[in-house]
Amino acid sequence: MSLHRALVLGSGFWSVLRTFKHRPGSSPAPVTLPCIPEVNLLDIEDAALMDALMLEILPADRARFRQYFSKRALGLGLMTAGPGFGKTTALSVATLGMAESLGPIFASAPTHVAVDHFAARLYAISSSVVDRHNRGKPERGRIRRQLVIRGYDEEEYEALQRLLRDAQETDDATADPWKRPGRWNLHLSKAYWLLICTRSRAVPSLDPRDSIAIHRLQRQIDQDPKLVRLRRVASGTISWEEYANGKMVDKNVIEALFRRILEAADIVCTTPAQSCGKFYRDWKKTKARGFAIDEAANMTRPDLYSLWGNTMMPCVLAGDVRQLPPAVMALDEKDSQGNAINRLGRDAKISPLEFFQGLGIPVYRLQTQLRMARGLFDLSKRFVYPDVDCTYGPGCSIELDAHRVGRDLESFVLGKHPQLNAAPTGSLQPIFIHCSNSYCHVDPMTKSKSNRDQVLVALDFILDFISSTAGRVEPSQITIITPYTANMHVIEEIRKGMKYATLASMKPAKTVHSFQGQESDIVVAIMATTKQSGPGMTTDEHQLNVMLSRHRSGLIIVGDIYVTGRLGGERNNGRRRTKSVGTSSSVYQTLWEKKRVIMI
């Protein structure tokens, strides 16, 4: 505890180490101060398993990865990189290594979406590693997947009941028309594993590679006469009406099965708030032997401490301090006397990842862009990560099928707007659509901005592009993001019109905050601001960085190119000259100079 207190105080470990006393009767020779402990987070005895795990890491990084995580002072590891560099994959490899070395691991992230993503990646990589390890081995030498559980609270039982009633409901299993949409997701939840054990039609069959604990539970459920009706309704042998009209399995029995699944877990994934609830608090305190945090740059320090505790358990944090910082309420609000309502707000904006980096804790840095097509990370590299030495990976070649949608987008734009410069050979480049004379509405209460004109331009562009591809590109491959909640609602309202019926499969529009950690083949970023309204939130470098980095194969920015002022190399033409604003101004200027701006 004393080491943990010294760490979070940030004042060094001298006060702890100096308490070491010379033991009576020992040699009078001078005794050096003890060093802080080191932990091997990759202490895996099975060499074949270690090799299979390391194949998930890029060849150029494997030696560095093993060296870093095999000797961590205090058991604390930090990992950082820009968007698309594979942070979640690398963190998942480290987490699986910790699970093999230390025991059960508690995994977390600041938002439900990030936790879902982390849990799914952990299970996918565990499956890949097991397949690689077991290839060509006899049954006795094979290993099984880690049991990964995405934890939820009270909604698990309700979701299970709905899925027993209708196996097709899946992710809408907790939907209630009288309540806000829930955060529950079927995949890897306790309900998911229990449905597998009861042979439900709503989930895949139990895989031979899955945890032995789940196989054991399925056999016990098969042999338990009290659960016969539950097995029958889950498998479809009897209908829900027959089940409901007879003796139903008691809720306490279902929750006892949930607890058994949780007790067998190798990795539990929840938000920090859920980790303090009755379902997971005991598991965290008694079973967890380490912690792994994704999107740690977006998490508050109190959230981490409520999860991690104060006993210096091994912990690995991954994130990017140049993306969104922790959300802080009432940051700039003042009372009637002009006093700040949240006087510690600036301190609260410092994430645990940024705090520990500032203390000088060594950091593992990823250096290869893996997601975006070549050329699409250039704006972020130039203006947000100018100090980062990085390269594009082999999966970034625009000739790959994965980036065909980007090539289609480039061909469509150049065919319709021949005045644009083509992207350099072998690369793709973002495109800006300038909406002249668009109107930005500012909500008088929330101050949130919306712009129907820009939304219409963006939706018409998407519609024309989809129509031009003759079915090669699906609307589901395109996502719209915007900085403002009000604009998000306008987008969804306009999309309901008959004109845009063909875009029905396109995912709902998201705000920048709600889309962090996610990605799409093509991203359309609608800024909503104009020269008259001012750039607003779009000048925030963290927000801009997220908007410029959620795509794989194409980025379209829709807005007012003059929102930050007159562009260099262009005549004023009577426009009022305004002051340029930071990174956003530099991005717009670059797109203008490259002749990648469509004027509408």
Image (spheres, grey):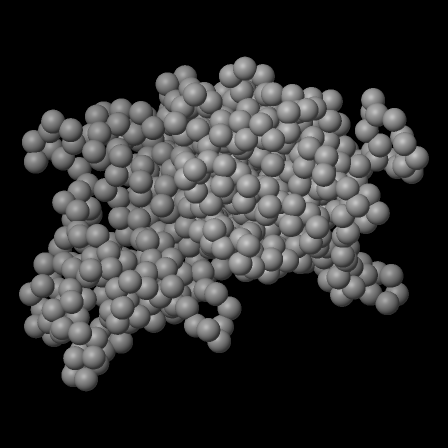
> Vertically, is 250 above or below 148?
below
For residue 138, which quarter of the picture? top left
Q: How many numbered marks are there?
A: 0
Q: Is residue 302 above or below residue 593?
A: below
| 446 on left or right of 115 | right
Extreme residue toward the bottom, this view: 245
- Residue 219 placement (x, y as % from top left): 10, 58
Identify which residue is drawn at 60% across, 36% down: 556
Give the x, y percent position of residue 62.
38, 21
Q: Quadrant of the C terminus?
A: top right
Instruction: Name the one closer to the observer, 556 or 151.
Output: 556
| Residue 142 shows in the view | yes
Instruction: Identify the residue at horizontal 52%, vertical 22% (top origin).
Output: 374
In this rendering, position of residue 134 left or right of residue 271:
left
Q: Is 306 on the left or on the right of 419, as rendered?
A: left
Q: Which sits in the foreground, 377 or 424? A: 424
Q: Say above or below: 511 vs 522.
A: below
In the image as oriented, which residue stretches furthest toward the top? Answer: 425
From the viewer's side, name the closer residue of 108 and 528: 528
Residue at the (58%, 27%) spot, across then down: 415
Q: Which of the 4 image quadrants contains residue 238?
A: bottom left
Q: Residue at x 46, y 73 (%)?
A: 177
